[in-house]
Amino acid sequence: MNFDRVLIIDWSANNSPKTGADSIWIADADRRRPEPRLLNPSTREEAMVAVRDVITEVLDKGERLFAGFDFAFGYPAGSHALPGKGEWEPLWKWLGEHVCDDAQNASNRFEIGSRLNNRFGTAGPFWGHPWQHAGRYGNLGARRPDYEQLSVSETRHIDRMISGAQPVWKLAYTGSVGSQTLLGIARLQKLRESALGDHIAIWPFETKFADDLSKSIIIAELYPSLFDIDRRSGEIKDEAQVRTVAECFLDAVQAGRFEDLLDGPRHQPRGVREQALTHEAWMAGFTDDVVRAVQ
């Protein structure tokens, strides 16, 4: 099955409205439009309004949409103290119920990290917070914990395969993706629970990678650094990333090979695919061909 439109969203965990560098960027690419439309909403609320508007427009036209977000959709398999023993759907539901993220970007993400750490009975696996907030978040430490002592994996299988990928437990400091993940999953869960939810499938969990792409709206995890970014003069890095990735996926749509980008790890060690489908998720575009190229 092919798609008519592609949305690529560079997410952010900023705690106040922000535009420009290190903020949310959205590329909206239509196969009938040669150049992606670029948006730079200042808050996560504005971003999700824009996403919902596009989904509604696509559904009204009887078309199909692929939307990719650049935060993790799951946690390392074996993290049994997480809600639902870390399986994606009960964990998403828990985050949707407990994460607070208001219209001005103020959130309780560090408190959520501390609450989840309590389930493990010790400091960790979540870590990282602003240094000036020392002592504010219970057992959420400022430094990386000992994951061997915790008997929890620090990274997902796919994170270990990619240079520069950050662990989902890390909530602050350079390159952290943990806060984006907590806030992003909660936002997507609210979208799933809305009137639009019946038309949405979360890749790869609900689609079994490319086995069932029948829903009109497919939402997936992305990692823009997988792609060769074409940065134009004057472009902000985040802006260039979403535009380039949108163009790459749109090219795949036009060439009729989009499903190949969603096929996932068919030739990985036994159990990797199953863990991705129940707990860890995967990154759209990271196919067996890409795996072989980075090994």
Image (tube, rainbow, N blue to C red):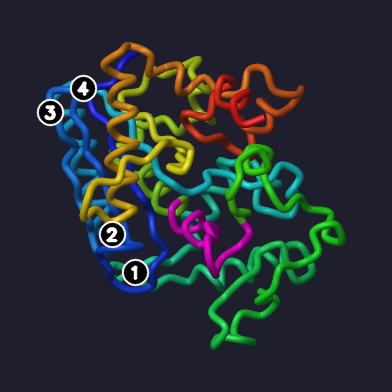
Q: Amino acid at mark 2?
A: Glu
From the top left corner, tell me how far across and down residue 29 is, in percent: 21, 33
Tell me how far mark 2 sits from mark 4, CA to CA: 25 Å
Please tell me which residue is depicted at 48% across the width and 71% down the height of the picture: 108
Kindly indicate whether the residue at mark 1 contacts the one at mark 2 (C-beta within 8 angstroms): yes
Asked whether, in this view, residue 73 is left or right of residue 233, the answer is right
Q: Nearer the viewer, residue 99 or 129?
A: 129
Name the residue furthest front. 233
Tell me how far mark 3 sits from mark 1, CA to CA: 32 Å
Q: Amino acid at mark 4?
A: Glu
Q: Which residue is mark 3?
A: 33
Q: Which residue is mark 1?
A: 105
Asked whether, in this view, residue 277 is left or right of residue 193, the answer is right
| N-term mark: 2 or 1 | 2
Secondary structure under tag 3 reads loop
Residue 198 within the magenta-colored segment of the rendering:
no
Please tell me which residue is depicted at 40% across the width and 47% down the height of the picture: 188
Residue 171 within the magenta-colored segment of the rendering:
yes
Kindly indicate whether the residue at mark 2 contacts the one at mark 3 (C-beta within 8 angstroms): no
From the top left corner, tell me how far across and down residue 61 is, in percent: 14, 24
Image: magenta residue range: 169-184
Q: Is residue 268 visible?
A: yes
